[in-house]
Amino acid sequence: MYLLGRMIGHILFLLIVVPMRAIYGAKRLDIYDDQILEDLKNRSFIIVSNHILPKSRFLRAISMPYDAYLLRRMFLKHDIKVTAFTSIDSLQRPRSKLQGFWMHSMKEPLMKGLVVSLDLIPLNRRVHDNATQRDLRQRLDKGGIAVGIFPEGTMFTSFSTTRKLHAGMGVYAKRYDLPVLPVYLHAYNTSQPMFIRVGQLIAADTQKDEIVKLVRTQWNTLAAMGAQSDDSVADGSLGDESRSDSQPAVPVTASKKSTPNSKVA
């Protein structure tokens, strides 16, 4: 099943991934405060970003979010390779031995092969995968790779300042001794101006719970700065959810960050 997954993954790469890289590589994307990436190009680190639910039913059906392609563009501009954790298990308890056999002996190996073929990191939350962890350690030791994590846990159509963030980013920061870099991607509506704002690096020795708090604070600040720079709040592009939260976005005063460092067309 693993080999079958690898074969399917290669086919999906050619039929879906390559065209999507071309499509989202041609869209206008403003990037703010990415100078820090020049200092990180020879290091390994964790990037945490908000996760965007595509409006396209086709992209939803194949579980292929476009936010990863936009983030990839920014990091490749600085010669940083990007990968990401992708779960291959459902965390559901099988209702029968037959279902358990399908889930654990068929589906998970199939998904692992598919994910590996797409140059992603298969994450099995049910069991510890020594081979995957060993391969990841070797890649990290070489440096120059960013490992993506979406701590919101799933995709959303708008940004929220109070949404629950999962602590996995802190766990992996500790396990692999990696700093964490928050980034905010404003691309909930691809027909409107899209931009990425890069936050400040969080040290690997920061406590797990503190990493979650710092990521939330930085995201709220970056989102508010982005909204001020392109009037997204006025036109509603951050979504009703973000404007109706009881916790307001972090106040931001005018600064030099109101203009992008680079524009990728």
Image (cartoon, grey):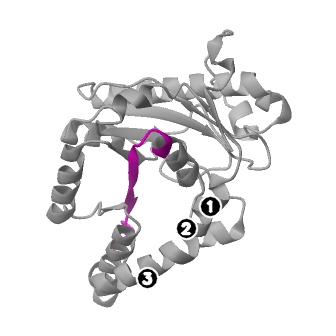
**Horizontal arrangement in the rendering, residue 207 relative to residue 56 (left or right):** left
| Residue 146 image offset from top left, x and y in percent | 36, 44
Q: Kindly report the distance in space between the C-alpha atoms of the residues bearing marks 3 and 2.
A: 14 Å
Q: Which residue is mark 2?
A: 18
Would you say residue 217 sits in the magenta stretch? Answer: no
Q: How many marks?
A: 3
**Vertical placement of residue 260 versus 72, above or below:** above
Q: Residue at position x 21%, y 46% from top? A: 142
- Going from N to C along the chain, the mark reached first, 3 or 2, is 3
Q: What SS does tag 2 mark? A: helix
Disc ID at residue 22:
1
Q: Kindly report the distance in space between the C-alpha atoms of the residues bearing marks 2 and 1.
A: 6 Å
Q: What SS does tag 1 mark? A: helix
Disc ID at residue 8:
3
Circle 1: residue type = Ala
* Visible residue check, residue 52: yes
Quarter of the picture containing the N terminus is bottom left
Q: Kindly report the distance in space between the C-alpha atoms of the residues bearing marks 1 and 3.
A: 21 Å
The crowd level at tag 1 (other Cα within 10 Å; few <14, some 14-19, many 20+) is few
Foreground pick, 193 / 77: 77
The residues colored magenta run 76-94
Asked if the residues shown at circle 2 and circle 1 are in contact, with their CB atoms under 8 angstroms apart, the answer is yes
**Vertical placement of residue 70 versus 222, above or below:** below
